[in-house]
Amino acid sequence: PVYMDNHSTTRPDPRVVEAMLPYFGAIYGNAASASHRFGWEAAEGADRAREQVARALGAEPREIVFTSGATEANNLAIKGAAQAYQRRGKHVVTAAAEHKAVLDTVRRLGREGWEITVVPCDATGRVDAASILPVLRPDTVLVSVMAASNEVGTINPIREIGRICRERGVVFHTDATQAVGKIPIEVNDDHVDLLSLSAHKVYGPKGVGALYVRRRDPMVRLVPQMDGGGHERGMRSGTLPVPLVVGLGKALELAMEERDAESARLLVLRERLHRGIAGRVEGIRLNGHPTERLPGNLNLSFAYVDGEALMMAMRDVAVSSGAACTSVDPEPSHVLLAMGLDEDMARASLRFGLGRFTTEVEVDFAADAVAEAVERLRVHSAAWAF
Ligand code: PMP
């Protein structure tokens, strides 16, 4: 089958795998061992990776905290900041279309005595920057809004939101897991205080990510969520997984080098896929913003088609569906519902994630497969006949 699920995860780039290999073997020291060359060698690899990650964000290496991925980075950012600033206030703001790693973390704070405001998104999945200022209160300490949606690819105005937060002295966190390496992000220009990212969304290994933590103008405080040996400046104890960290650094270096050319290439392929489907299938709806969206994302709903059946029919094209994005959660996508879709249209959606290894041949194959599946399913749909 053709792989078009690059928002779920990506195939590791062979250049990333190659960079990691020595660290799975000969270079096995503990990066925290400062007294011998085994440790120094490992530390050199980790230091280089820290620089590569920092460079991708316009940050400084000492502002990067390695984590096990974006889920952990989001937990550390949100719980860590909420706890650190709780004497100033216990009000946290986030948005309806966030990833569960943000929403569920904020919900837990809500059960533990924090007050939560969830701002809505518009019909394209976008947070209006103007909706932030009216919900800020004297006791608001943290705002968390994602940079780009993992479902509909919509890009949020994080620079404007960051500016509003900075002016009001509120910490601004952005989950940039889907955005880093794909669209320009610069923590200073964008007034970002905390930023989460993950290696496996940018052709790196699974199980590693990072949190950017602003160290000046202003310095942001966090309460660590993992206590122990005091690694990562005390913010995340635990021996560094040096091979993974090296892979993260290499993945981001490559993503930055190739970002602009790759974005342009993906945009052409994405439009080709959209046209290929729209030219042959009626009753489709584009979910997400028409232009302010990740170049590799296409999210479509198909009227009068059963979502589960559509997903089953997509055997030769690996995509995700709004019907059951995780098997433990059979509810239709909370993101599509927040955008105002009804349950049927939310279920009957497909998310195409094009990536670095997607080819034109694959795009044409996918367009054929989708058109054929939808036509076949509609023959059986009574509603379509009317
Ligand atoms: N946030 C967003 C926006 C994501 O797309 C993902 C991955 N689905 C995560 C967080 C979680 O990342 P990880 O798998 O690295 O924990």
Image (cartoon, rainbow, N blue to C red):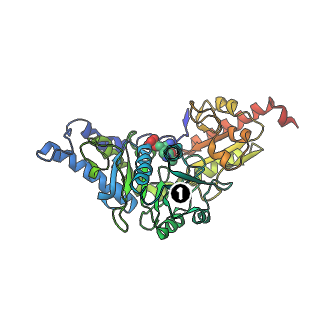
Looking at the rendered image, the quarter that the C terminus falls into is top right
Residue 17 lies, in percent from the top left, at 34, 40
Q: Nearer the viewer, residue 76 or 32?
A: 76
Q: Quadrant of residue 227?
A: top left
Q: Residue at x 73, y 33 (%)?
A: 306
Q: Classify mark 1: helix, strand or loop.
A: helix
Residue at the right extreme, as displayed: 386
Number of residues whose C-alpha sits closer than 10 Å to that of mark 1, classed few (under 14), some (14–19) or many (20 or more): few
Q: In which quarter of the image is the N terminus?
A: top right
The mark tally for this picture is 1
Q: In this view, does 8 lie above or below 221?
A: above
Determine the residue positioned at 47% across, 53% down: 176
Q: Quarter of the image holding residue 12?
A: top left
Q: Which amino acid does label 1 sit on?
A: Ala
Q: Is residue 147 visible?
A: no
Residue 307 in view in this figure: yes
Image position, residue 62 (x, y; %): 29, 58
Q: Residue at x 69, y 41 (%)?
A: 346
Which residue is denoted by mark 1 in the rendering?
264
Residue in the picture at 38% in, 39% down: 207
Q: Which of 291 and 262 is in front in this view?
A: 291
Say whether residue 210 is left or right of residue 91: left
